[in-house]
Image (tube, rainbow, N blue to C red):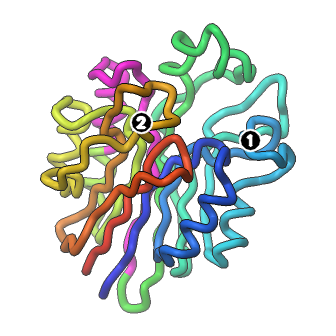
Amino acid sequence: MRIKFIQVNIYKGRYLNSLLDFLKSEKPDIVSSQEVTAGEVNLCQDKSANLFETIKNELGFDGVYHADLNFSDMPAARFGNAVFSRFGIMDKKVVVLKDFRPITYDELEGDTAYDIRPKIPRHLLDAVLDLGKLKIHAMSWHGAWTAPPVDTEETLRQSKLVASYISSLEEPFILGCDANNILGNETIGLINKAANNLMIGQNIAQTTHPKVHKIVPRGFLVDFIFCSKDFQLKSLSAAQILVSDHLPVVANLEI
């Protein structure tokens, strides 16, 4: 059985129309996303939109969502992770990695961002998918923030929790993430011990967008797809297209 899996941080919908066009043209089976927002934190024109519902409805997919952040000055705003699937979703689980108090939007994006972002809530979102005679776990994770991407006590702690969870799964799994960390660091190495890292050996230099990401002209490979040994990789790409400040990672797999 062939499965097309896409990992993409959607950058709060900054390029929502282009993102939707891309996803529709790619015809994925599963999409893992981060920075899925609603309300005033959206970067698309419609500040009232719920981007999870918009993407789910536009694709005609099932989906699950969990918001990380509560904004004290924007009660209706949401910011979190999502999994979208053309397969039915049987169940979902949220693995809490980090709790924190409600924040203001200015704390997230203003002068205090470098102090606040490493502390904000994080989770692993697991959707259990019904593939008929088989069920699989499709997951989304947004790693603890560092700038530049280095190992910290917090990135390692959260990575250990993720590795422990996926190691406990008895069914096949695929995990898409913006890890906020890079190959060669222990934060990613811990996950490598529990799963197959599809980015290894693929000659992809970076997944931050080379023109619009805030760290330009630097670039890092921070987006990953991990899977259980049940999957065989057929192809993997990260096209330099403008659907986000990250590049979408597209994996064609066989289970």
Residue shown at the point (52%, 41%) measured from the top left: 245
Please state which of residues 123 and 81 is positioned toward the viewer in this rendering: 81
Whether residue 182 is situated above or below residue 248 in the rendered picture = above
**Distance from Cα at disc 1 to Cα at disc 2:** 20 Å
- For residue 42, the mark is 1
Vertical arrangement, residue 154 with respect to residue 182, above or below: above
Whether 223 is drawn above or below 216: the answer is below
Q: Position of residue 156 (x, y in %)?
A: 29, 27
Within-10-Å neighbours for mark 1: few <14, some 14–19, many 20+: many
Near mark 2 (Cα within 10 A), the count class, few <14, some 14-19 or many ≥20, is: many
Which residue is identified by label 2? Answer: 143
First along the sequence among labels 1 and 2: 1
Res 231 seen here? no
- Was residue 137 drawn as part of the magenta stretch in this picture? yes
Residue sitting farthest toward the bottom = 133
Query: Is residue 185 a member of the stretch shown in magenta?
Result: no
Residue 175 lies, in percent from the top left, at: 36, 57
**Front residue (pair 154, 115):** 115
Residue toward you, 165 or 37: 37
Location of residue 235 by image quarter: bottom left
What residue sits 28% from the left and 45% below the top? 164
- Residue 231 placed where, x, y %? 22, 72
Q: Amino acid at mark 2?
A: Gly
Residue pictured at 36% horizontal, 78% vertical = 3
Q: Quadrant of residue 248?
A: bottom left
- Tag 1: amino acid: Asn
Image quadrant in which the N terminus is located: bottom left
Measured as percent of width and height from the top left, residue 59 is found at 64, 74
* On-image quarter of the C terminus: bottom left
Q: Circle 1 sits in a helix, a strand or a loop, which is it?
A: loop
Please provide the residue range marked out in magenta. Answer: 135-162
Who's the residue at 31% across and 41% down the image? 206
